Amino acid sequence: LRADLGKVVGAEHVLAGDTREYLHDSTDTRGVHGRADAVVLPGTAEEAAAVLAWCYERGVPITPRGGGTGYAGGAVPLGGVVLSLERLTRVRSFDPLLWRIEVEAGVRTGEVRRLARESGLFFPPDPGGSEQSQIGGNIATNAGGPHAFKYGVTGKWVTGLEAAIAPGELVRTGGPLRKDAAGYDLKALLVGSEGTLGIVTAAWLRLLPAPEAVHPAVGFYPDARAGCDAVLRVVGSGLEAAALEYLDAGTLAAAGPSYPGRIPAGAGFAVIAEADGSQDEAARLRDELLSVLGEGALGTGTPSPAELWRWRDGLVFAVIAKRGGKLGEDIAVPLDRLAEAIEESVALGRRHGFETVSWGHAGDGNLHTNFLVDPTDPEELARAERAGEELFELALRLGGTVSGEHGLGLLKRGHAGWTPRVAALQQAIKDAFDPKGLLNPGKKL
Ligand SMILES: Cc1cc2nc3c(=O)[nH]c(=O)nc-3n(C[C@H](O)[C@H](O)[C@H](O)COP(=O)(O)OP(=O)(O)OC[C@H]3O[C@@H](n4cnc5c(N)ncnc54)[C@H](O)[C@@H]3O)c2cc1C
């Protein structure tokens, strides 16, 4: 297998199947690891298609891999070939005056954002692992992030895709277009398909002129009810926050000491809102947000955006530090059920013997609920998996979904709550793209 694939991509670009860093993703904090027979690093889209053709002819499973930051085990291989996109890092075209860029799948998310920024433009999707995640991985998971509240998730910014599809050819759908109403929307099917329908090799992305200023506003509340009321007031007020985030009591306790400002005594919940726009607009909006957040608050604050987001990005590490590991899920519920979901998830974790903390994208009703575990204790991990399953039931009961942005991957398949007819339609789409079931088998469906 390695000798043959070496002829396609060059022997030095085929690694042994037990190369550790390709066998897990961010779910390693809950002990998830896979196995592979080889790791292949194509240097071009054509090579990626040729690897797929070789695998497809011989019945070898193929797991596409981006930056490996996924939280659903999607890039964890279950045998066969790992195809890593890390060498596809070319910017194929960039037209700042037309607000668009065409990049290969392996370009890091942070790099796309920096390139745009250097020309006064803005690529809004900002999932937390953006210095490591790749644009192809973001597309394959339809990643969100704090600013998805105003700007939408990754798919909204994709106008075209190039992908290697079975049995091993490159196709293009969409392009540098702002509209395309011809045919079924294959691009939308590939977005969020978690490597189960095809291998994204390049994307055309839409950009925006960058906002001139961003000004955060933070409110602190005694509990989740009071905090979620503030979230509902912000939305109901018609003020267009760019981001609307929350931290619950446990998260505040873990990460509070490094907050860039003062947290009032008794605070058990925080809401972060951000205003963006021209200098004047952003400052006015921030003041209006502060006044809405201030009702019922123990206190408010206006930290600098750089310090605030650095702190926000580090929450996960403060939480993991408590017990060495966490089992995290990202359910989403209708906005008016957010307080219930936060409170019930803590109670649910307690019933299973876990300290449970959550934070997330409040405006999108998206919770990142984490059961704190000792990752070296198999009994605890198994117990946390059972708590996770109850959390999925809670999400569905509240009219929500088992995944707001991380996808189903390996860990959540079977829990989506589809009716038999919807499950059959999902399977029919899979079969149309991948009749032999070799693209990331065991994931999503
Ligand atoms: C600290 C931290 C914060 C995070 N914050 C957020 C957040 O705010 N919002 C959010 O949505 N996610 C977040 N994530 C999760 C993760 O970053 C996203 O899911 C991201 O989109 C995964 O991209 P990746 O390149 O790392 O993909 P991987 O983990 O490598 O793969 C993810 C899935 O996509 C498939 N895939 C990858 N590349 C391709 C390709 N080119 N073609 C086809 N399939 C492919 C894989 O097979 C797998 O199923 C966070 C992760 C971390 C570690």
Image (cartoon, grey):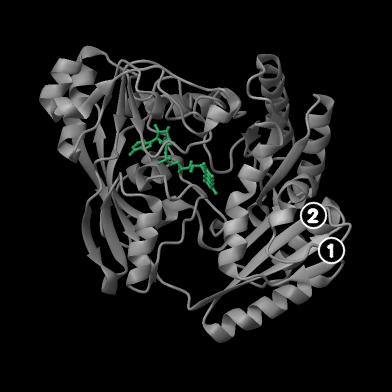
Say if residue 29 shows up in the picture. Answer: yes
**The N terminus: image quadrant:** top left
Can you tell me which quadrant of the image ligand 1 is in?
top left
Amino acid residing under circle 2: Phe
On the image, the x and y values in percent for residue 120 come to 37, 74
Q: Is residue 175 left or right of residue 212?
A: left
Q: Pointer 2: what residue?
A: 269
Which of the marked residues, 2 or 1, is nearer the chain's N terminus?
Answer: 1
* Mark 2 closeness class: few <14, some 14–19, many ≥20 residues within 10 Å: many
Q: Residue 264's mark?
A: 1
Q: Is residue 230 left or right of residue 104?
A: right
Please identify the quarter of the rendering in which residue 320 is found. Answer: top right
Distance, label 2 to label 1, CA atoms, is: 11 Å
Please report the residue visible at 33 percent of the width from the left and 42 percent of the height from the top.
Answer: 186
Please report the residue visible at 58 percent of the width from the left and 30 percent of the height from the top.
Answer: 29
Q: Judge whether 182 appears above or below 24 on screen.
A: below
